[in-house]
């Protein structure tokens, strides 16, 4: 009668489990820089090739992030997780996480539309728009820098801004319902204005979500640029296969 011996785990898996434990127990703190590859390989008694395999899996799991030319860091846990399939305001996004939305650094400008702004809003360059800039906070932590552009022809001469959700403002004050948006999202490597407003660390990155919002008549109502601190947001999308 033979006895099954316990299966021996690969060295990279043993190193992987140890590093996962160090991160999840807080011994390696969020945002901290990891030791060099040579130091870690020596610490775990494995080759650098074996270590790289374990770290590749850690990166796939979203536990670490590599900064080219800087090093590898323990990824900060995002404050907010959200899918991109559904269109809702930043206020709603924050409230859905059980946090209190707030606003600071609020400014309103009345100025001629640039060529880019006019193209997005189907205006003529030089047509008057209102540009609203503000920082949105979640439990008083700055998380999004918002720039919203609205045509004067839609909001009128007496426009002074809005407290929280631009969607709610449009519905209550102008009976305009935003029904869909055309969106573009990209990573911004460096923007000193955004980094200062969001109180970002030097290793944080910026996600820019640009959207043109339309009403039920396919009229462009709002052109927005939302700058997110990527360390505080985890966006995802559910994709369905079409058969």
Image: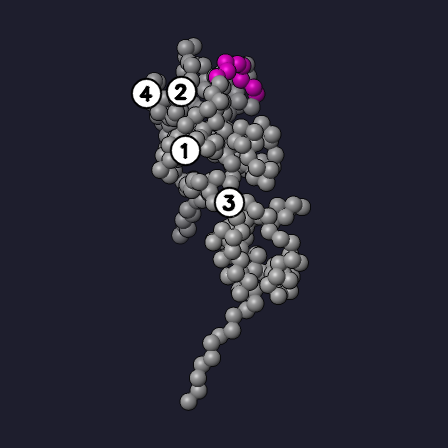
Q: Quadrant of residue 94?
A: top left
Q: Tell which tag, 4 or 3, sits nearer the viewer.
A: 3
Identify the residue position indicated by label 4 in the image.
Answer: 172
Separation of marks 2 and 3 at Cα, in angstroms: 32 Å
- Secondary structure beneath dot 4 equals helix
Q: What's the magenta region?
A: 108-115
Q: Left of 45 or right of it: where is 211?
A: left
Which residue appears at 62% of the width and 58% of the height?
40
Q: Left of 1 or right of it: where is 186?
A: right
Q: Are marks 4 and 2 in contact (CB under 8 Å)?
A: no
- Secondary structure beneath dot 2 equals loop
Residue 215 is tagged as none
Count of numbered marks: 4
Percent coordinates x, y for residue 220 in the rendering: 44, 24
Identify the residue position indicated by label 2 in the image.
Answer: 162
Q: Tell which tag, 1 or 2, sits nearer the viewer.
A: 1
Which of the marked residues, 3 or 1, is nearer the chain's N terminus?
Answer: 3
Q: How many residues crowd mark 1 within 10 Å: few (<14), some (14–19), many (20+)?
A: some
Residue 113 sits inside the magenta stretch = yes
Q: How many residues crowd mark 3 within 10 Å: few (<14), some (14–19), many (20+)?
A: some
Separation of marks 1 and 2 at Cα, in angstroms: 19 Å
Residue 148 sits inside the magenta stretch = no
Which of the marked residues, 1 or 2, is nearer the chain's N terminus?
Answer: 1
Q: Quadrant of residue 93?
A: top left
Percent coordinates x, y for residue 213 in the rendering: 43, 28
Which of the marked residues, 1 or 4, is nearer the chain's N terminus?
Answer: 1
Identify the residue position indicated by label 1 in the image.
Answer: 139
Separation of marks 4 and 2 at Cα, in angstroms: 11 Å
Separation of marks 3 and 1 at Cα, in angstroms: 17 Å
Which of the marked residues, 4 or 2, is nearer the chain's N terminus?
Answer: 2
């Amino acid at each position: 009668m033979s006895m099954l011996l316990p299966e021996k785990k690969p060295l990279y898996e043993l190193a992987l489990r140890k590093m996962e434990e160090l991160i999840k127990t807080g011994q390696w703190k969020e945002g901290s820089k990891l030791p060099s590859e040579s130091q870690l390989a020596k610490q775990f008694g494995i080759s650098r090739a074996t270590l790289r395999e374990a770290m590749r899996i850690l990166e796939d799991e979203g536990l670490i992030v590599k900064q080219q030319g800087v090093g590898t860091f323990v990824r900060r846990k995002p404050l907010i997780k959200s899918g991109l399939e559904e269109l809702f305001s930043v206020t709603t996004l924050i409230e859905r996480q059980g946090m209190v939305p707030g606003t600071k650094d609020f400014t309103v400008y009345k100025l001629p539309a640039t060529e880019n702004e006019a193209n997005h809003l189907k205006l003529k360059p030089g047509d008057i728009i209102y540009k609203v800039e503000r920082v949105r906070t979640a439990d008083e932590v700055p998380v999004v820098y918002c720039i919203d552009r609205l045509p004067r022809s839609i909001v009128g001469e007496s426009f002074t801004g809005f407290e929280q959700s631009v969607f709610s403002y449009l519905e209550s004050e102008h009976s305009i319902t935003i029904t869909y948006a055309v969106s573009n999202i990209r990573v911004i490597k460096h923007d000193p204005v955004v980094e200062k407003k969001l109180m970002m660390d030097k290793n944080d990155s910026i996600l820019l979500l640009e959207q043109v919002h339309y009403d039920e008549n396919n009229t462009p109502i709002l052109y927005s640029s939302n700058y997110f601190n990527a360390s505080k947001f985890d966006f995802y999308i559910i994709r369905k296969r079409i058969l």
